[in-house]
Amino acid sequence: MPPVDPNDVLMTGENSFIRLSTDGGKTQTDRLSHWRVLWCPSGSGHTLFIQSSLTDNRPRVYADNPAVARWLQRTIETYLFPAFADEKLPVISAEFARSGDPRSSAAETIVSTSDRIRMTWWDCIDPFVLTMPPGANNRPIGVFSTFFPARSAQVELNGRIAAATPWPEMRGERQGSSACLAWSETWVKPRG
């Protein structure tokens, strides 16, 4: 195997997520996709896509760089969750901060002029590297990421806490969760 992946890099950074359910994943009540983009063609920055019981199930987009948010919508979220790819959604200006780590608890805090959102992950199990080259899951783009699956996660919006919980998910032969810190993440596309 050659030491260099043959694909072109689309972006590198993080894409941690929380998906919550009241019935073990049959239906989702809350879905959050948090991006810390270190590099992409539109620059660097942070974006949070959220559709939650706390937002009356309406999708919202928060970002500190609107160009990065729009690039994510066009390039990656269109394959992950089409409701987040709607470029008619306004981009709400926000500040982003991280605290903690997977050994105890980790949190991302997103603050706009009207909202304060806190995503928290804890009780993480053994991490693993997710390897999905272009073509996997019928997607033309691929991703490589280090997943820290959390048995427990919480979403808070302006002091209200979502009532649902994450559920276990298998990723190949590895135990995962619907709430993962996804760090050291790189998205790729075929060359040419």
Image: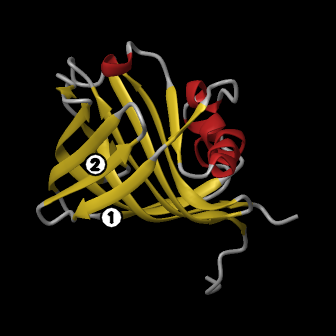
Q: Is residue 37 above or below residue 76?
A: below
Residue beneath disc 1: 128
Name the secondary structure under disc 2.
strand
Q: Nearer the viewer, residue 145 or 116?
A: 116
Q: Residue furthest right?
A: 192
- Residue 28 visible here: no
Whole-angstrom CA distance, mark 2 to mark 1, is: 9 Å
Q: Is residue 115 above or below residue 41?
A: above
Q: Nearer the viewer, residue 76 or 37?
A: 37
- Residue at (25, 35) in percent of width and height: 155
Q: Is residue 126 above or below residue 91?
A: below
Q: Residue furthest bottom?
A: 3
Left or right of 25, for residue 72? right
Q: Is residue 82 above or below residue 179?
A: above
Q: Nearer the viewer, residue 192 or 61?
A: 61
Q: Nearer the viewer, residue 181 or 67?
A: 67
- Mark 2: which amino acid? Gly
- Residue 115 visible here: yes
Q: Earlier in the sequence, mark 2 or mark 1?
A: 1
Residue 120 pos. (x, y %): 22, 46
Corner quadrant of residue 21: top left
Disc 2 vs disc 1: Cβ atoms closer than 8 Å? yes
Q: Which mark is residue 113?
A: none
Residue beneath disc 2: 176
- Image quarter hosting the N terminus: bottom right
Residue 122 pos. (x, y %): 15, 51
Q: Residue furthest front?
A: 113
Name the secondary structure under disc 1.
strand
- Mark 1: which amino acid? Phe
